[in-house]
């Protein structure tokens, strides 16, 4: 068992909830994962995360998305969002301005931030994704967001369980 997973399993309930909520702002997701502790393996935790993600309501998804800053504007002082959005760090001023416009158009259409698993993506790849996805129906976009959020949660949970 990875040392971080053993520590997570041993945490007092409030501390474990806080650790989960730092990874995903959905209260329902965090409570579902908390209720299934202890986890025998990291894969069991990831599977539980995927199952909890699949059960989130539209309101739960909105709560989760509210915890994510717009692409190109990571939360100040938040190393997680800065690390995840690293692909925008060296982007040109033109690309940053275009992403701002696209983010605003996307938010106006869907009522929430553009959410993508940005880890490992370039600024151009993120721009192309928002351009493509802005044409989706709200229902289709909600399911894409659910998938992207699931990817983000797995990456964040992996960091939790792999910590020494």
Image: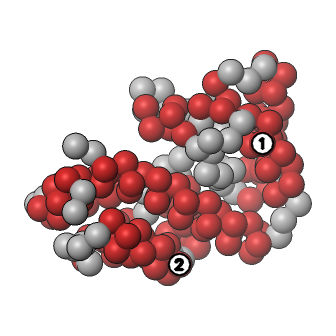
Report helix, strand or loop for mark 1.
helix
**Please, is residue 145 above or below residue 57 in the view?**
above
| Residue 117 seen anywhere in this rendered image of the structure | yes
Specify the label residue 10 is tagged with. Answer: none
Q: Closer to the camera, 44 or 146?
A: 44
Structural crowding at the residue carrying mark 2, measured as other residues with C-alpha within 10 Å and reported as few (<14), some (14–19) or many (≥20): some
Question: What residue appears at the point 17 percent right and 64 percent down from the top-left corner?
Answer: 9
Q: Closer to the camera, 63 or 78?
A: 78
Q: Closer to the camera, 156 or 76?
A: 156
The mark total stands at 2
* Residue 40 image position (x, y, % from top left): 23, 73
Report helix, strand or loop for mark 2.
helix
Position of 76 compared to 19: left or right? right
Question: What residue appears at the point 60 percent right and 68 percent down from the top-left corner?
Answer: 146
* Quarter of the figure that contains the C terminus: top left
- Residue beneath label 2, please? 54
**Please, is residue 11 above or below residue 35 in the view?**
above
Structural crowding at the residue carrying mark 1, measured as other residues with C-alpha within 10 Å and reported as few (<14), some (14–19) or many (≥20): some
Q: Kindly indicate whether the residue at mark 2 contacts the one at mark 1 (C-beta within 8 angstroms).
A: no
- Residue beneath label 1, please? 125
Q: Distance of mark 1 from mark 2, alpha carbons?
A: 26 Å
Question: What residue appears at the point 53 percent right and 78 percent down from the top-left corner?
Answer: 54
Position of 118 compared to 96: left or right? left
Q: Quadrant of residue 94?
A: top right
* Residue 14 image position (x, y, % from top left): 17, 59
Question: What residue appears at the point 68 percent right and 41 percent down from the top-left corner?
Answer: 121
* Residue 87 image position (x, y, % from top left): 66, 32
């Amino acid at each position: 068992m990875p040392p971080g997973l053993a520590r997570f399993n041993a945490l007092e309930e409030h501390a474990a909830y806080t650790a989960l909520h730092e990874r995903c702002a959905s209260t329902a997701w965090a409570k579902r994962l908390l209720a299934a502790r202890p986890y025998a393996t990291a894969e069991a935790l990831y599977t539980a995360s995927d199952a909890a993600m699949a059960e989130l309501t539209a309101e739960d998804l909105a709560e989760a998305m509210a915890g994510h800053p717009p692409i190109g504007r990571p939360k100040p002082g938040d190393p997680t969002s800065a690390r995840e959005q690293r692909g925008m760090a060296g982007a040109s001023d033109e690309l940053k301005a275009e992403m701002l416009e696209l983010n605003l158009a996307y938010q106006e259409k869907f009522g929430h931030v553009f959410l993508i698993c940005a880890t490992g993506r370039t600024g151009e790849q993120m721009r192309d994704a928002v351009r493509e996805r802005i044409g989706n129906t709200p229902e289709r976009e909600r399911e894409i967001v659910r998938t992207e959020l699931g990817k983000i949660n797995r990456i964040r949970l992996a960091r939790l369980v792999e910590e020494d």
